[in-house]
């Protein structure tokens, strides 16, 4: 029996390739950033480190030191725990000390070695400003770094001029203070002079000028002379003796008063001579023992003054004789 099998269908491959769609780029791809150029010289590294310190407010070296100190603390804590474990394990004490010392030395050497590398890496690769990276701190925004030597010289000249102006202003201020004090002194002196002038002006207002009173003064002098001549003529008809000569009763009274005064003085002097004591001088020039005696001497002194001295009596006598014998 013949079997009928269907032959496999033959497929033809197409030789036409589909078009390739190319999408044009919408944005230009930026070029890759330049590779940072790290400072090569020690001076450049120091300048970069100063810039980083100024920006951060703390030194990167202190950050590295804090990390190393923290690691050392952890290492010492681990060694202390290892020492406690050795004591609990019951090993020989001498062997334990040797092993502990060797372990501690190994820890310290490895920490120092590895963290020296860490410090160099941090300071030279992390806390660093590449030389090809322009950077300007906020407080340097208005600072011009492209200043030439001529610009610096001009700036120095301007600063010197400002200094001279400041010195001149201070000197002028000092001179003005001195002048102000001098002016104040002169003002006070002028005020005193003004008060004196006002006082003199007030006195002038109360007085009449001499030119206005000269005529009146001459007239007054003439009247005075006329009155004196009239009085002299009238006095020629009177006797001065009749006017001033005392009566007999007055002469007796005067003589009695003088005698009594002299007698009291004599008795007081005799009494003082007989009685020595502390004395004090009175107003009349004598010496008294008490306030009562001083009062008595004062009364006597006033009586003597009232009577008059011998010179006065002699003068009156001469005047009377002249009147009697013109």
Image (cartoon, rainbow, N blue to C red):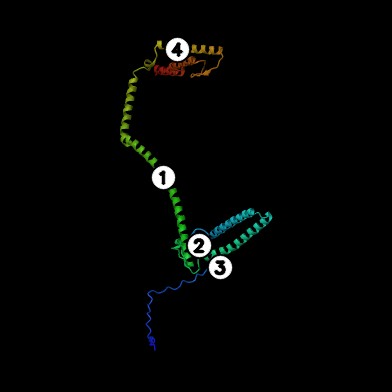
Helix or strand or loop: what does disc 3 sit on?
loop
Work out how far the residue at label 4 is from the one at label 3, CA to CA, in angstroms: 135 Å
Mark 3 and mark 1 lie on one chain; the one further toward the N terminus is 3
Residue drawn 33% across the image and 22% down it: 233
Residue extending furthest toward the front: 1
Percent across and percent down for residue 127 are 52, 63
Residue drawn 45% across the image and 12% down it: 257
Q: Residues within 10 Å of mark 2 (few under 14, many from 20)?
A: some
Helix or strand or loop: what does disc 1 sit on?
helix
Residue drawn 42% across the image and 11% down it: 253
Percent across and percent down for residue 187 are 40, 44
Percent across and percent down for residue 144 are 45, 65
Q: Residues within 10 Å of mark 1 (few under 14, many from 20)?
A: few
Work out how far the residue at label 4 is from the one at label 1, CA to CA, in angstroms: 73 Å
Residue drawn 69% across the image and 55% down it: 94
Q: Is residue 65 left or right of residue 197?
A: right
The residue indicated by pointer 1 is 184
Q: Nearer the viewer, mark 4 or mark 3?
A: 3
Residue 52 numbered mark, or none: 2
Mark 2 and mark 1 lie on one chain; the one further toward the N terminus is 2
Work out how far the residue at label 2 is from the one at label 3, CA to CA, in angstroms: 17 Å
Q: Is residue 265 left or right of residue 82?
A: left
Looking at the image, do the residues carrying marks 4 and 2 touch, with CB atoms under 8 Å apart? Answer: no
The residue indicated by pointer 4 is 257
Quadrant for the C terminus, please. Answer: top left
Mark 4 and mark 2 lie on one chain; the one further toward the N terminus is 2
Residue 41 numbered mark, or none: 3
Q: Nearer the viewer, mark 4 or mark 2?
A: 2
- The answer to whether residue 208 shows anywhere in this view is no
């Amino acid at each position: 029996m013949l079997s009928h099998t269907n032959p496999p269908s033959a497929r033809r491959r197409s030789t036409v390739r589909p078009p390739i769609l190319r999408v044009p780029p919408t944005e230009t791809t930026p070029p890759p950033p330049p590779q940072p150029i790290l400072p090569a010289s020690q001076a450049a590294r120091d300048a970069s480190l100063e810039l980083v310190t100024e920006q951060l407010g703390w030194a990167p070296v202190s950050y590295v030191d804090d990390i190393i100190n923290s690691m050392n603390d952890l290492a010492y804590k681990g060694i202390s725990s290892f020492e406690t474990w050795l004591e609990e394990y019951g090993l020989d004490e001498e062997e334990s000390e040797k092993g502990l010392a060797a372990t501690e030395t190994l820890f310290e050497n490895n920490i120092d070695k590895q963290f020296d590398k860490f410090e160099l890496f941090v300071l030279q690769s992390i806390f660093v400003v590449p030389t090809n990276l322009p950077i300007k701190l906020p407080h340097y925004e208005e600072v011009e770094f492209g200043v030439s030597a001529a610009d610096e010289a001009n700036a120095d000249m301007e600063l010197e001029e400002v200094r001279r102006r400041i010195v001149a202003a201070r000197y002028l201020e000092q001179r003005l203070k001195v002048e102000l004090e001098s002016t104040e002194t002169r003002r006070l002196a002028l005020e005193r002079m003004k008060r004196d002038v006002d006082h003199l002006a007030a006195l002038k207002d109360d007085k009449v000028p001499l030119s206005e009173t000269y005529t009146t003064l001459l007239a007054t002098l003439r009247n005075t002379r006329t009155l004196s001549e009239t009085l002299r003529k009238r006095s020629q008809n009177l006797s001065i003796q009749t006017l001033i000569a005392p009566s007999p009763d007055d002469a007796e009274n005067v003589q009695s008063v003088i005698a009594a005064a002299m007698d009291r003085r004599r008795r007081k002097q005799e009494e003082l001579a007989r009685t020595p004591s502390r004395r004090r001088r009175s107003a009349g020039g004598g010496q008294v023992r008490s306030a009562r005696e001083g009062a008595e001497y004062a009364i006597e002194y006033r009586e003597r003054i009232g009577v008059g001295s011998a010179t006065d009596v002699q003068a009156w006598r001469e005047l009377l004789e002249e009147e009697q014998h013109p």
